[in-house]
Image (tube, rainbow, N blue to C red):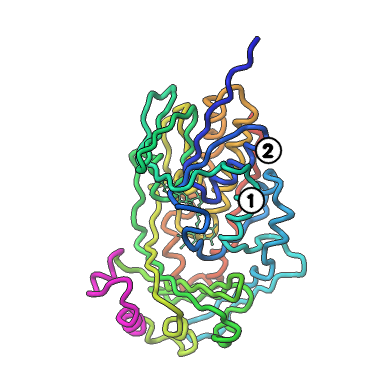
């Protein structure tokens, strides 16, 4: 009896979810192709830092054979956490214990490099922006890229993030604005150039809120601190104020007015930043987001269940990736694997999304004595055997 040909698996998106899925598939002798719109691994700055939880993100990295390397690259001291009031008084301070590995931080760029370096050469095809997926539900599917390329696949995995193009093949849902917007500000070489801010944030993060606005500051590797100024505003608050996102001085003036009751020390997180602000309105998919099973297309990570950024997104993306790859390795057909994967992933995502629905506003609450705790664990169950 001849063995059936290996399924052609196309993963769209070389983010943490897509790369983890590819890595675990390869460990099981399956060869996927990953397509990403970036022109190369260094095409854009990967930005901030992520904490990988011991219940989900770390479980996936263990399955990927990368957990020890992750611990070598991670910053356990990044688990330090302070909560302040707008006057700058420290209300809560968590200092991690020696060897604490509950949720160590890693820079996004380092995590991406760790995953990329673990893949067989040529796995990722850069410069491929997916336009659409068509073809019959039973396959093969056709992926059309904006560079004019078309490829066929027996399974299309949408790991293409918040504004997924693959999602359109299974669901009409699109992300909606949460009512809360982040404005990102960066501080570089902080121990030398911004020592007071470095002391305020420590080795991990510092947060404060007054009901309408908040701040979340987080240290990354290499002496960088990223600050999110968090406001309950319309998504277009910058242009509605007659400004553009690059109008740093105008935005700063607007912010200083809005944070006028805050302590001068905290207001330095608004005034002393290096470079322009980055506007990041917070979007989320409707809750619950689900779709009718189709054997040749599925989604993982933000493409499947974009939620407010409360410390779960990357962990769920890694867990999804792990479970999907294991399901493919353990089932006779990709259709059976997708069914088994979605049976676990969709209810878990719905449960977490319900808990976080509207939680972007919690980031502004003064009622939470443990404001910073909203960034703590939202652990998910470990990957189940999806056989
Ligand atoms: C401001 C902010 C802060 C956050 N902080 C945290 C945090 O502290 N902890 C946490 O767990 N999560 C955090 N998140 C969420 C986290 O970043 C995401 O949940 C996580 O990155 C999802 O991984 P992913 O692989 O599903 O998608 P992504 O990381 O979004 O990766 C998607 C990939 O797909 C590619 N792509 C997109 N469209 C196309 C296309 N059409 N064709 C080809 N390729 C495409 C992109 O280039 C990218 O490489 C934060 C999110 C935001 C916005």
Mark pair 1, 2: CA separation: 14 Å
Find residue 272 and report its horizontal and vertical position in percent.
45, 85
17 in relation to 218, above or below? above
Q: Nearer the viewer, residue 78 or 343?
A: 78
Q: Magenta part of the protein: which range?
A: 235-257
370 in relation to 163, above or below? below
Find residue 318 and report its horizontal and vertical position in percent.
58, 48
Q: Which residue in the protein does label 1 denote?
A: 117
Q: Which residue in the protein does label 2 denote?
A: 27
Figure quadrant of residue 340 = top right
Find residue 208 and report its horizontal and vertical position in percent.
49, 76
Horizontal side, residue 135 vs residue 68: left or right: left
> Main SS type for the magenta part?
helix
Q: Is residue 147 visible?
A: yes
Q: Is residue 305 visible?
A: no
Q: Dot 1: what SS?
A: helix
């Amino acid at each position: 009896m001849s063995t059936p040909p290996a399924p052609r698996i196309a993963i769209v998106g070389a983010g943490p979810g897509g790369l983890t899925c590819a890595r675990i598939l390869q460990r099981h002798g399956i060869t996927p192709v990953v397509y990403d719109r970036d022109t190369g691994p260094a095409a854009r700055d990967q930005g901030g830092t992520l904490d990988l939880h011991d219940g989900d993100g770390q479980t996936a990295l263990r399955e990927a054979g990368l957990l020890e390397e992750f611990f070598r690259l991670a910053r356990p001291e990044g688990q330090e956490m302070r909560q302040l009031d707008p006057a700058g008084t420290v209300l809560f301070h968590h200092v991690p214990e020696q060897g604490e590995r509950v949720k160590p931080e890693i820079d996004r760029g380092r995590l991406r490099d760790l995953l990329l370096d673990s893949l067989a050469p040529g796995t990722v095809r850069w410069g491929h922006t997916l336009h659409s997926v068509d073809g019959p539900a039973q396959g093969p599917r056709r992926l059309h890229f904006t560079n004019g390329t078309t490829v066929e696949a027996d399974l299309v995995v949408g790991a293409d993030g918040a504004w997924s193009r693959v999602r359109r093949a299974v669901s009409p849902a699109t992300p909606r604005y949460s009512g809360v917007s982040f404005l990102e500000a960066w501080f570089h070489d902080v121990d030398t150039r911004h020592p007071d801010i470095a002391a305020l944030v420590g080795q991990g993060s510092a947060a404060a809120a007054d009901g309408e606005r908040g701040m979340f500051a987080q240290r990354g590797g290499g002496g960088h601190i990223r600050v999110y100024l968090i406001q309950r505003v319309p998504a277009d608050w910058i242009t509605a104020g007659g400004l553009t996102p690059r109008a740093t001085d105008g935005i700063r003036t607007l912010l200083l007015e809005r944070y006028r009751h805050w302590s001068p020390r905290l207001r330095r997180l608004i005034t002393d930043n290096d470079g322009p602000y980055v506007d990041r309105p917070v979007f989320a998919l409707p809750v619950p987001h689900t779709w009718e099973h189709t054997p040749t297309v599925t989604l993982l990570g933000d493409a499947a269940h974009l939620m407010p950024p409360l410390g779960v997104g990357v962990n769920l993306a890694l867990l999804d990736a792990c479970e999907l790859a294991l399901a493919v390795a353990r089932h006779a057909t990709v259709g059976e694997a997708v069914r088994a994967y979605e049976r676990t992933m969709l209810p878990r995502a719905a449960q977490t999304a319900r808990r976080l629905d509207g939680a972007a506003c919690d980031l502004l609450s003064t009622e939470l004595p443990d404001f910073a705790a909203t960034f703590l664990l939202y652990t998910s169950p470990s990957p189940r055997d999806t056989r």
